[in-house]
Image (cartoon, rainbow, N blue to C red):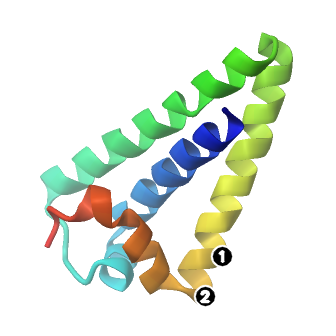
């Protein structure tokens, strides 16, 4: 279940990362409209909030929230490192969600 939480958090941070203009040009080579930016922001936050659910089903609320904070840190660090060193790999990982942008 924690793998599901990590995947959801990674997708959420990836969508929020693609949302910014400079990163959108680096990752998907397209300029996003205002509507697309809002939709990506909404989808990113929903994925981040949904990543809390698997953490709460494993343990109690207190331990689940601590594990979720750890998971968010790991997912955000992964997205930042991939954006820095392998942006095309990040684009490939975001392709199922962002295929409609091009």
**Residue at the extreme top:** 60
Proximity of marks 1 and 2: CB atoms separated by less than 8 Å: yes
Q: Where is residue 20 drawn, in percent x and y? A: 37, 66
**Residue 45 falls left or right of residue 29:** right
Instruction: Report helix, strand or loop for mark 1.
Output: helix
**Residue 34 falls left or right of residue 90:** left
Q: Which residue is mark 1?
A: 81
* Rendered residue at 74%/51% (across/down): 73
Q: Where is residue 26 drawn, in percent x and y? A: 37, 84
Instruction: Report helix, strand or loop for mark 2.
Output: helix
**Residue 56 falls left or right of residue 83:** right
Of the pair 21 and 24, the residue shown nearer to us: 24
Q: Which residue is mark 2?
A: 85
Q: Work out whether 27 lies above or below 73.
A: below
**Residue at the extreme bottom:** 85
Q: Which quarter of the image is occupied by the N terminus?
A: top right
Q: Quadrant of residue 102?
A: bottom left
Q: Where is residue 74 drawn, in percent x and y? A: 74, 55
Please tell me how crowded label 2 is: few (under 14), some (14-19), or many (20+) other residues with Cα within 10 Å.
few
* Rendered residue at 30%/50% (across/down): 40
Q: Quadrant of residue 86?
A: bottom right
Q: Quadrant of residue 59?
A: top right
Please tell me how crowded label 1 is: few (under 14), some (14-19), or many (20+) other residues with Cα within 10 Å.
few
């Amino acid at each position: 279940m924690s793998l599901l939480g990590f995947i959801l958090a990674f997708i959420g941070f990836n969508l929020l990362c693609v949302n910014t203009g400079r990163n959108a040009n680096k990752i998907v080579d397209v300029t996003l409209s205002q509507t697309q930016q809002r939709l990506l922001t909404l989808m990113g936050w929903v994925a981040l909030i949904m990543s809390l659910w698997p953490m709460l089903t494993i343990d109690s609320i207190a331990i689940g929230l601590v594990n979720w904070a750890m998971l968010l840190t790991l997912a955000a660090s992964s997205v930042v490192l991939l954006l820095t060193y392998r942006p095309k790999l990040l684009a490939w990982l975001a392709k199922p969600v962002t295929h409609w942008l091009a």
